Amino acid sequence: ILDDIGTERLTGWVNETFYEIINERLLNNKITIYTSNCRADELKHDSRITSRILGSTFAVKCPEEDIRVKLKERDNVDIERILLGGDIV
């Protein structure tokens, strides 16, 4: 799993490392899961990398909500119930 791609600071080393990882996995028919907040065609990596990603993936769109915020809201409700002597749902 390559998590949150597109957020890294692009340097020559980053591009070369990404290329080596992605290309090796493609050559060996290994599954790679990419997560990102941007579409593959919006990535700023060089064309060797983006073409390999675009040529070997399909997008799964997830809801545009921050799971951390949702979990925190749920935790706050649970804490409030505990403090007020109620049961946690």
Image (tube, rainbow, N blue to C red):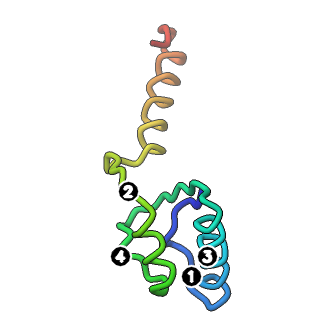
Disc nearer the start of the sequence (4/1): 1
Mark 4, mark 1: which one is toward the viewer? 4
Give me the residue at 52% from left, 62% from top. 4
Using the numbered discs, state the Cα–Cα distance from disc 3 to disc 4 in whole angstroms. Answer: 16 Å
Question: Do callouts 3 and 2 mark residues in contact (Cβ within 8 Å)?
Answer: no
Give me the residue at 42% from left, 76% from top. 43
**What residue is pinned by disc 4?**
42
Along the line of sight, the residue nearer the viewer: 86 or 30: 30
Badge 2 crowding class, 10 Å Cα cut-off, few under 14, some 14 to 19, many 20 or more, is few
**What residue is pinned by disc 2?**
58
Using the numbered discs, state the Cα–Cα distance from disc 4 to disc 1 in whole angstroms. Answer: 15 Å
Badge 3 crowding class, 10 Å Cα cut-off, few under 14, some 14 to 19, many 20 or more, is some
**Quadrant housing residue 2:** bottom right
What type is the residue that disc 3 sits on?
Phe
Badge 4 crowding class, 10 Å Cα cut-off, few under 14, some 14 to 19, many 20 or more, is few
Disc nearer the start of the sequence (1/2): 1
Using the numbered discs, state the Cα–Cα distance from disc 3 to disc 1 in whole angstroms. Answer: 12 Å
Disc 1 element: loop
**What residue is pinned by disc 1?**
9
Disc 3 element: helix
Image quadrant holding the N terminus, namely bottom right
**Quadrant housing residue 41:** bottom left
